[in-house]
Amino acid sequence: MRRDVAEGDGDGGSTQAAAPAAGPGGIVTVAGIDFVGDTAGALFWPEERLLLVADLHLEKGSSFARRGMMLPPYDTAATLARLGAVIAHHAPRTVVALGDSFHDGHGPSRLTAQDQAVLAALQRGRDWIWITGNHDPEPSAAVGGMFADCLAIGPLTFRHLPTGGDGEIAGHLHPVARVSVRGRAIRRRCFAGDGRALVMPAFGAYAGGLNVRHAAFAAAFVNGFTAHMLGARRLYAFAARHCLPD
């Protein structure tokens, strides 16, 4: 019988282990620039005091409820709480959300007053840039911040859909890695990168995950890549070719 220990990667938000707390997990290098890979699934650029998160999928629970699939309506609050912990830890000057920040285009209108207040507090005193995603293509001024299709800083380009370009940091694919450790299979969210480009893990509480052995990752990284798995206190690096399929 296959035994998996998951960590925050279920499509409906169900987990078998607590999500890791915010904190520096390890160095992840992209285009010669060293980032701090946070164990919560965020990426911090210390020199620019810039924090990256991807695929928050806020209001996924309420989106499913509108279609008759009832999920506990607490995903937005949980995601914002985790994001708040990451922001408190790193004190970024700029936050960039790499698309699919809301699960659908009407998500901002379904935010509760409390969640709106939390989001406004997180934005206060810093720049906040929403990158357009495929789930939320129409920006909503109600969520504050600025909007862009992509953002270029020096050798780096931040966008939602990965294209395989040099210096690219993207989201969309929700990478997870599955490995065997002491006779049991462990499946966790991860950063996927080859030093030239990087795909971020999904940050949202209810965001699903795609195994790094999927063909979509082979298309993004033609010469192989590393999966930096999120642990409780650090990142664990595995060559993707050594990871297990689902």
Image: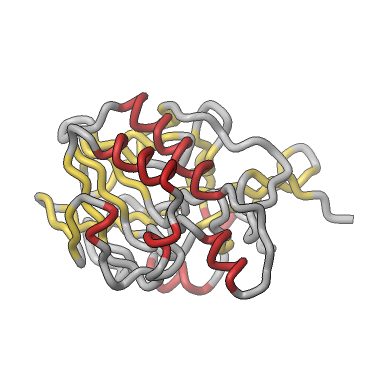
Q: Residue at x 58, y 59 (%)?
A: 61
Q: Residue furthest left?
A: 154
Would residue 47 appear left or right of 1 to someone viewing this image?
left
Q: Residue at x 27, y 47 (%)?
A: 30
How is colour applied across the structure in the image? secondary structure
Would residue 228 appear left or right of 159 to someone viewing this image?
right
Q: Residue furthest right?
A: 1
Using the rendered image of the protein, determine whether residue 129 is visible from the camera's viewpoint. yes
Q: Nearer the viewer, residue 19 or 233?
A: 19
In the image, residue 75 above or below residue 234: below
Give how far across and how far down residue 242 sits, in percent.
Answer: 60, 54
In the image, residue 88 above or below residue 69: above
Q: Nearer the viewer, residue 142 or 239?
A: 142
Q: Nearer the viewer, residue 246 or 121?
A: 121
Would residue 14 appear left or right of 112 to someone viewing this image?
right
Q: Nearer the viewer, residue 234 or 135?
A: 135
Residue 182's image quarter?
top right
Q: Residue at x 43, y 69 (%)?
A: 104
